[in-house]
Amino acid sequence: MSPAAGPDEGGLREQRLLFIVRWRLLPFMFVLYIVSYVDRVNVGFASLQMNRDLGLSASVYGLGAGIFFIGYFLFEVPSNLLLERFGARPWIARIMVTWGVISTAMMFTDGVTSFYVLRFLLGVAEAGFFPGMILYLTYWFPEGERAKTVALFMTANALAGVIGGPLSGALLTMDGRAGLAGWQWLFLLEGLPAVVLGGVVLLYLPNGPRDARWLAPDDRVWLAERRERERAGGGHQSPRAVLTNGPVWAFSLLYFAIVVALYSVSFWLPQILTRLSGQSDFVVGLLSSLPYAIAAIGMVLVGRHSDRTGERRWHVAAPALVAAAGLMLSALVASPVLAFAGVCLAALGIWGSLGPFWALPTAWLRGGAAAAGIAWINSVGNLGGFVGPYGVGYLRDATGNFAIALAGLAGMLVIAAVLAVKVPQARRAR
């Protein structure tokens, strides 16, 4: 079949190639993202022992957990532009090795200062990984496939909680072995896989369709040329212009509102569940897997429905409102069971909004604007990962419970829903 094939033949060819690409790349990218997310949020489980051992207050812990995103913010855009320049394979490998080394070094935390410094450096090291992955997906998948594809990729975010919770809880039971605390074992054994996988990236991940040796030569050219036509199809071309563009800031603020809730739940979930259940660290790890499992299902279902209908904005707004209702339920009820159900509902909505959200800016940004724009939206948005966890810690210290903090997060998600229906939505690709 030649590149000049008719519309029907071209559609069949595209679906065949996307099937091959999806199964060749997504499982590996999925594993990378699981390792990334576990290393980013495992401090939440470490805090069950580390805060006591090092005398860290809730406010100090919240600031340290969130300071990761300051380093992330400062280096996100440069990192993504360097990925475009040097290629996905070497740059993603570099990111993984450096973050793995620093994540492992978290085991040497001995007080407030080292906690802050290492968390900041971890953010610097990981900057560019997630937006680089989103940019990389645009090399292969057209606009009409992106909500589903991004949602499938980002279910790794939720499944990291399914896997990471029980794993982290089990590692905490190693407390005292070989003279190390359980939280030190957690950082050591969960940080090393990133270093190993960084080497695997160099062997496995192609820079783009033209480098995919597992595709026929004419298929490589066809995919690459289709992507180049799409990139040239319109939109904002200057990376510098992106940083002063109104719609880009609208996307950034919307993502900020979602991320405030996402990382507040991620970093504080172990302590919230400990307060609700009164169970051991291991049992809390098991309990934490359920909200993430529900979130993974929601991501796939919402992403598929968004792609099928071609609608994006309400597929962000509606899940955000569902999540707000879940957090308010958790804040208001006295029953631990109902409060836990509210947390599960919140996870369903927060994570369910992510696939349709990322389909919005990746359809609107094109050409040279894509690398800078995606990175800028992600970096500004991820400042919510600093504001949210610190705010929860401050309110926890001030009130002695999580109720006011959860209600505040619900309000932020209502704001996200309002912003979602206002952002621009590109026409669906045909």
Image (cartoon, helix red, strand yellow):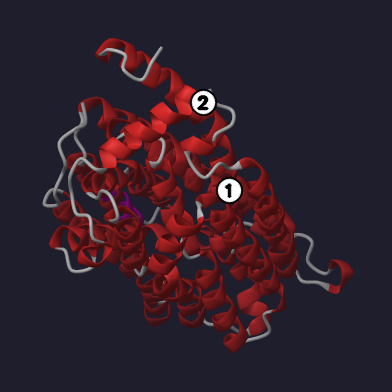
Write down the region rendered in magenta: 325-330
- Tell me where residue 109 appears, x and y as whole percent: 67, 80
- Where is residue 335 drawn, in percent x and y? 41, 52
Q: Residue at x 45, y 65 (%)?
A: 79
Residue 272 visible to an observer of this rendering: no
Q: Tag 1, which secondary structure?
A: helix
Residue 69 picture quarter? bottom left
Relative depth, front residue between 109 and 368? 368
Q: Which mark is residue 225?
A: none
Q: Earlier in the sequence, mark 1 or mark 2?
A: 1
Q: Which mark is residue 32?
A: 1
* Residue 326 painted magenta: yes
> Which residue is more in the foreground, 256 or 400?
256
Cα distance between the residues tagged 1 and 2: 27 Å
Q: Quadrant of the C terminus?
A: top left
Label 2: state its secondary structure: helix
Q: Is residue 237 above or below residue 353?
A: below
Which quadrant is the N terminus positioned in?
Answer: top left
299 above or below 273?
above
Look at mark 2 in the image and give the residue it sits on: 217
In this view, the residue farthest toward the right is 178
Name the magenta segment's main secondary structure: helix
Q: Nearer the viewer, residue 94 or 64?
A: 94
- Residue 56 in view (yes/no): yes
Residue type at mark 1?
Answer: Leu
| Camera-nearest label, 1 or 2 | 2
- The image position of residue 406, as x and y in percent, is 33, 63
Q: Residue at x 61, y 77 (%)?
A: 51
